[in-house]
Image (cartoon, rainbow, N blue to C red):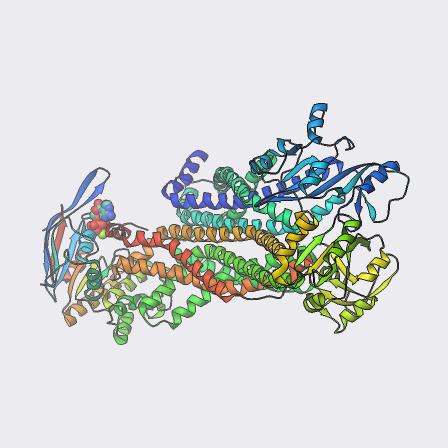
């Protein structure tokens, strides 16, 4: 089992009152499997993805990656997990503003010591970023930035790809290309993909669909 | 509309309290430095004026001895008999262990009617003139001297300047060991008879000489005050700039919602004004405190160097308080000017991205660099061709400003090179990110650079000075004992008494005459190995001593040579038409006057009336103490008339150290302010930095690693700033030694460098940066992941 989420709950404090976002989510993802996660805006999809990436702690329940419980890990081990096994595409891209596009793409892979020039070139080409490699993120459009974020997540050939609406800012043609790229990676390296999307068209192209509503996955 | 807009704008500060604190603190410090120094200067000037007006000395002419020394009281009696209406004054320094005070003896009966009040009643007059007498002094002087034995009963008088005890002349003669001696005569109504030989008339208000002499000292102080003021304003500038930068989105929204640009500018101006007023009030209070702390040292310096009495207590007018607040207001507006200007020119839909700011700054780097080059060239030109003290200070200003402007470009280049050279991706990101922080950090780093450069510069000057000064003292004070007799008869008796007891008795006789309108000391020198072996000659002919002894030549001090441009080989003409060839120039530190040395026989020929009371004695070192003892106890000289070489050296060194203790204090304070500037910009940056750091954390660095990197970044930037500060500081030291000193005091010193000091300062700068970065780094290391995730959850 690549990723398993067991009865995970998460709430945020809003003033004196706590709002429960996740109320016992169960989810599992095998290596080589691709799952689409859908749900209304504000239902907690991003929150769940962040928990899976070990960025935040669930209030209760367990999350394990390749059999390893995230909760028990120290900060440094969790950071190591993120850089070498997880590829995370943020909804808001979160590129590193001080680095050029090429360096942004290479950043995580080189941190993890897994950077390969030909793979990076392939990514840049497929993502249509070749002309922009020497620019800074803020010089790109939203869709271009999104493609850089995807490139960064995939550059290290992660075992688990967590993508939060990776095609939200892209046109249909580009969306198809990006999805093809993600699936190529799933097929070739046996990675697992958990992808948040609002598009039924794209969701249908993945192997499975999960719907998040009222804090649980159905 | 205005009020709603104002509330929206001001709410920013509620959410950014640290930044607000930084703004207020910077403004407060700037105001405090400025007003503090002004307070010291104002107090000193007030004291000079008060001292000059005491006993009407600023309105009445005076009679003094041509050599500036005390003279016998018989001359006074003779003058009165001849119909001169004059009143005697004796002035000197009284010392008991560590307590000292200037004592001024007057004769209340003959004194002009402009003296201190309180002697109206006959009974008071009687107790004033009959032993043990009464001493009148300013209240803080009375308090300082409480319990010191040996002085008459002290009484508070508001008319007496601080640091001075006014008493009857008879009592003063006892206190100062100057029986039957007076320092000068105040001329109420001149007589018709000519003045006796050896005395001369000094016109009224010549005491403004004190103002002239101390001017350079005050200018120095003002320059330092201004430097600290500028450093404080840099903090304000960066805090205001950041506050504006962070509110770009808000400005955009407000304007999109219909607030006119003019209204926005008015609102922001009033915001700055409100903050400046608050900070100004605190700053002025702090400045008062600073002045009160520093004033005793300043007073000691001025009295030690120039004999200028300065009150140790502060009394300041409302104008000063208002002036301080106005300075805060103007400073804040000046510091906010650039930000406001940018706002005015900002298109409504300007991007609010950190890199955009960085790139805009990168563009301004070029004109900054250009301006810096122009300033550096100007500094060089001024240093080489400039004349006088103000040119010297303009050189310093151009140099410092140029260095400050060159710093961002320098750091930009260095971090860029580091990024290209580094291999690991972490290191590359570190440098790229450091580069991006530069616009936010550069002002604080400028403050650090300026503080370091000033420290190195002043350190070089003081260190060089100290080194030269101690060596010079050894040369100049080669004799073991310095004595002075009270009368001609005593002097003659003394010389015969000393026969066989000493290796040599060298006269120290001199007169003071105007030469081309400038008071000039002329001293006689007896040909002796003491001078041949030791005298601090700067440049001169090989046979200068033989030529001097022949009586057709003279040595002049450096001040004289520099003021007149005279060189060895040229001639000086004395008032009576006597021409002398200059054979050497010697160094004469600490002497505010120009001086020349001629053969002693020539002196007595030209000025037969010269008083022949002072002597230097050569004695084997092991017999010095015994001889000094015998001079006092067997021969009967007052202790104040017998000085041992090491006592004079100790006193001179003390005056010297005191002189620079104020600058040292200001220096340390400036460094502290710079550290504060770094802390504040790091704290404010840490807020807008979160979105830049969160992704790095998300893709695999721990918070601890990021915190360590933050610390390293501060250290690296401080280190680079130090590297730049070093050459600037050395240049500064050179300008101080070769330009400012020459213009202010008339002497130049060889420059010595003190690399261990640099290492210490560099360490201090790194420490300051580490301390400043510690808290922001710690906050990052212990930040809850939820806050970092929050960055991803919220739209930026
Ligand atoms: N750091 C936070 N603090 C407080 N509340 C939060 C935080 N992050 C998310 N929330 C709340 O949690 C809920 C779920 O947010 P989340 O971003 O996971 O939704 P989402 O399903 O990704 O929505 P969308 O499709 O719009 O991206 C929202 O109501 C949001 O307000
Ligand atoms: Mg979301």
Image position, residue A6 (x, y; %)? 9, 54
Q: Is A126 on the left or on the right of B528, as rendered? A: left
Occupied quadrant, residue A164: bottom left
- Residue B136 against residue B568 in the figure, above or below: above
Residue B167, given in percent of the width and then of the height, sits at 68, 35
Q: Residue A3: horizontal and vertical position, in percent?
A: 12, 60
User: Which quadrant holds the N terminus of chain B?
Assistant: top left
Q: Which of B165/B182 is in front?
A: B182
Question: On the picture, is B254 further left or further right than B169?
Answer: left
* Viewer-closest of A82 and B745: B745
Q: Is residue B718 visible?
A: yes
- Total number of numbered labels? 0
Q: Quadrant of residue B296?
A: top right
User: Can residue B737 be seen in the rendering of this structure?
Assistant: no
Which residue is found at the position 61% from the left and 38% from the top? Answer: B150
- Is B306 left, or right, of B512 in this rendering? left
Residue at 54%, 57% (x, y): give it. Answer: B454
């Amino acid at each position: 089992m690549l990723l398993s989420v067991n009865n995970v709950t998460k709430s945020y404090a809003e003033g004196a009152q706590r709002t429960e976002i996740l109320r016992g989510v169960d989810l599992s993802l095998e290596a080589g499997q691709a799952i689409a996660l859908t749900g209304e805006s504000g239902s907690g999809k991003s929150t769940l993805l962040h928990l899976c990436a070990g960025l935040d702690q669930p209030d209760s329940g367990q999350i394990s990656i390749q059999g390893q419980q995230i909760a028990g890990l120290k900060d440094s081990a969790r950071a190591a997990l993120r850089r070498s096994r997880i590829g995370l595409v943020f909804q808001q891209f979160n590129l590193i503003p001080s680095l050029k596009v090429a360096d942004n793409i290479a950043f995580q892979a080189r941190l993890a010591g897994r950077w390969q020039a030909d793979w990076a070139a392939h990514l840049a080409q497929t993502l249509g970023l070749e002309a922009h490699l020497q620019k800074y993120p803020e010089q790109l459009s939203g869709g271009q930035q999104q493609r850089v974020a995807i490139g960064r997540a995939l550059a290290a050939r992660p075992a688990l790809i967590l993508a939060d609406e990776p095609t939200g800012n892209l046109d249909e043609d580009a969306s198809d290309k990006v999805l093809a790229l993600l699936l190529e990676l799933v097929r070739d390296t046996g990675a697992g993909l958990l992808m948040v999307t609002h598009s039924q068209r794209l969701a249908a192209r993945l192997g499975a669909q999960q719907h998040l509503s009222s804090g649980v996955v159905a | 509309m205005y009020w709603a807009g104002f509330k929206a704008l001001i709410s920013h500060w509620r959410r950014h309290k640290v930044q607000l604190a930084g703004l207020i603190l910077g403004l407060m410090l700037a105001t405090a430095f400025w007003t503090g120094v002004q307070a010291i200067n104002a107090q000193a000037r007030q004291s000079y004026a008060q001292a000059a007006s005491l006993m009407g000395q600023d309105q009445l002419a005076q009679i003094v001895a041509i050599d500036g020394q005390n003279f016998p009281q018989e001359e006074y009696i003779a003058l009165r008999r001849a119909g001169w209406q004059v009143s005697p004054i004796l002035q000197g320094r009284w010392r008991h262990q560590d307590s000292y005070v200037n004592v001024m003896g007057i004769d209340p009966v003959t004194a002009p009617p402009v003296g201190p009040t309180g002697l109206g009643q006959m009974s008071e007059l009687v107790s004033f003139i009959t032993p043990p007498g009464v001493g009148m002094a300013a209240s803080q002087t009375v308090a300082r001297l409480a319990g010191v034995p040996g002085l008459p009963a002290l009484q508070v008088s508001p008319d007496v300047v601080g640091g001075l005890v006014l008493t009857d002349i008879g009592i003063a003669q006892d206190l100062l060991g100057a029986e039957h001696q007076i320092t000068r005569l105040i001329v109420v109504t001149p007589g018709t008879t000519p003045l006796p030989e050896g005395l001369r008339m000094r016109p009224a208000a010549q005491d403004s000489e004190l103002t002239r002499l101390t001017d350079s000292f005050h200018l120095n102080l003002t320059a330092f005050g201004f430097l600290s003021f500028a450093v404080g304003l840099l903090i304000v500038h960066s805090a205001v700039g950041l506050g504006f930068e962070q509110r770009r989105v808000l400005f955009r929204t407000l304007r999109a919602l219909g607030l006119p640009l003019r209204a926005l500018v008015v609102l922001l101006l009033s915001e700055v004004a409100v903050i400046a007023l608050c900070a100004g009030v605190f700053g002025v209070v702090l400045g008062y405190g600073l002045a009160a702390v520093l004033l005793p040292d300043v007073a000691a310096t001025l009295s030690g160097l120039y004999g200028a009495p300065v009150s140790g207590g502060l009394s300041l007018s409302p104008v000063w308080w208002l002036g301080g607040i106005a300075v805060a207001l103007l400073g804040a507006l000046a510091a906010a000017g650039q930000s406001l200007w940018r706002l005015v020119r900002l298109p409504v839909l300007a991007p609010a991205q950190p890199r955009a700011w960085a790139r805009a700054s990168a563009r301004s780097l070029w004109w900054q660099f250009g301006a810096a080059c122009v300033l550096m060239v100007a500094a060089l030109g001024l240093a080489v061709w400039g004349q006088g003290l103000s040119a010297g200070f303009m050189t310093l200003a151009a140099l410092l400003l140029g260095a400050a402007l060159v710093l961002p470009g320098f750091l930009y280049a260095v971090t860029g090179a580091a990024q290209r050279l580094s291999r690991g991706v972490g290191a590359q990101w570190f440098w790229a990110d450091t580069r991006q922080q530069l616009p936010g950090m550069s002002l604080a780093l400028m403050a650090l650079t300026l503080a370091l450069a000033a420290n190195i510069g002043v350190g070089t000057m003081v260190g060089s000075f100290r080194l030269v000064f101690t060596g010079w003292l050894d040369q100049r004070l080669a004799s073991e004992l310095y004595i002075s007799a009270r009368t001609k008869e005593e002097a003659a008796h003394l010389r015969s008494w000393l026969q066989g007891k000493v290796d040599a008795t060298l006269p120290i006789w001199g007169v003071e005459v105007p030469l081309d309108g400038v008071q000039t000391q002329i001293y006689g020198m007896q040909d002796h190995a003491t001078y041949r072996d030791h005298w601090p000659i700067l440049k001169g002919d090989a046979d200068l001593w033989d030529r001097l002894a022949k009586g057709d030549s003279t040595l002049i001090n450096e001040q004289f040579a520099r003021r007149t441009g005279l060189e060895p080989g040229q001639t000086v003409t004395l008032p009576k038409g006597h021409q002398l060839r200059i054979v050497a120039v010697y160094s004469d530190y600490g002497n505010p006057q120009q001086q020349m040395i001629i053969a002693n026989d020539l002196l007595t020929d030209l000025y037969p009336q010269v008083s022949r009371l002072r002597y230097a004695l050569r004695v084997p070192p092991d017999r010095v103490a015994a001889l000094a003892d015998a001079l006092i106890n067997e021969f009967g000289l007052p202790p104040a008339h017998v000085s041992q070489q090491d006592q004079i050296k100790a006193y001179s060194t003390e005056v010297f150290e005191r002189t620079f203790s104020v600058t040292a204090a200001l220096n340390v304070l400036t460094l502290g302010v710079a550290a504060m500037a770094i802390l504040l910009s790091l704290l404010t940056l840490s807020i807008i930095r979160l979105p830049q750091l969160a992704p790095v954390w998300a893709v695999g660095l721990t918070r601890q690693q990021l915190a360590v990197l933050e610390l390293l970044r501060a250290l690296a930037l401080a280190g680079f700033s130090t590297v730049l500060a070093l050459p600037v500081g050395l240049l500064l030291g050179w300008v101080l030694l070769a330009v400012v000193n020459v213009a202010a005091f008339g002497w130049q010193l060889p420059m010595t460098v003190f690399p261990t000091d640099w290492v210490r300062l560099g360490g201090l700068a790194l420490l300051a940066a580490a301390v400043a970065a510690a808290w922001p780094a710690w906050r990052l290391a212990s930040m809850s992941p939820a806050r970092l995730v929050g960055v991803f959850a919220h739209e930026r």
